Amino acid sequence: MIQSINRAMLIIQTLSQEEKEKWLAAELAEETGLPISTVYRLTQSLMQHGLVTHSEGTKQYKLGYKWMELGLKMFGKLDVRDVTRPILERLALEAEETVYLNIPSDTNSIIIERIDSPRNVKILDSIGERIPLHIGGANKTILANMPRNKMEGLLEQLVPDKQEREVFEKELAEVKQKGYAISFGEKTKGTIAVGAPVFDFDNRVFGAISIEVLAYDITEDRMSFFIEKVYEAAQQISSGLGGM
């Protein structure tokens, strides 16, 4: 029984590779090192449970939609704070600054988690506060990673001037490419925010985390450190949510 489960997992892991969606039985046998008779037997069992599908026309196998159903159920039961809080706490200690988790809501983002800086001097925005999506490092990473049509629709509401909007779209393209954003005093004068996006199990942007610091306290080395740590923490949270 255990051997069959392990072999079935080899097939599932092969089918889940991003580089190739559909596989012939012979290709699965070559990739997994399993006898082709075993591949046929296990794929038949997996197909009965909706975990694998098969095209009669092309004779190719791919993952079934049952995985999406299971993923949605798991995500529905997931307490996001259970995943995010330990990572945010560690980030706040390492950076010695206040960190935030924001999620999008219409044309705004909402702060749903905050870990305070361990230092006496700190910047504090309230949990539940709404911030327009075109303002701040965290929000820019959310916008930049939305589907293009949704992002453009939101920008038409947030940035009515066409020329300003075109400039902003170019900035968002750079943000998406870099994987992080920096804002200078956009919400609160005299502050700098460094944000990075968080993705869910379907690799859609779920929200963003950020560090907010006083501008006078920043150096080039410290900025590089913040970028590295925010990006790293965002990747860890995305992984915990089943994302990229």
Image (cartoon, helix red, strand yellow):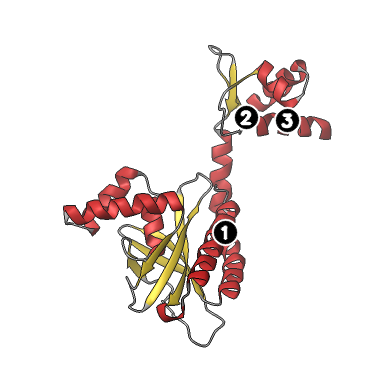
Split into 4 quadrants, where in the image is the N terminus? Answer: top right
Residue 15: give x, y in percent of width and height. Answer: 62, 29
Dot 3 falls on a residue whose secondary structure is: helix
Dot 2 falls on a residue whose secondary structure is: helix
Q: Quadrant of residue 181?
A: bottom left
Residue 76: give x, y in percent of width and height. Answer: 53, 52
For marks 3 and 2 on the same chain, the one whose residue lies earlier in the sequence? 3
Within 10 angstroms of label 3, few (less than 14), some, or many (20 or more) residues? many
Dot 1 falls on a residue whose secondary structure is: helix
Q: Amino acid at mark 2?
A: Leu
Q: Which residue is mark 3?
A: 8
Q: Which residue is mark 2?
A: 15
Q: Which residue is mark 1?
A: 232
Q: Residue at x 21, y 57 (%)?
A: 164
The residues tagged by marks 3 and 1 sit, at their Cα atoms, a distance apart of 33 Å
The reply to whether dot 3 and dot 2 touch (C-beta < 8 Å) is no
- Between circles 1 and 2, the one closer to the viewer is 1
Within 10 angstroms of label 2, few (less than 14), some, or many (20 or more) residues? many
The residues tagged by marks 3 and 2 sit, at their Cα atoms, a distance apart of 11 Å
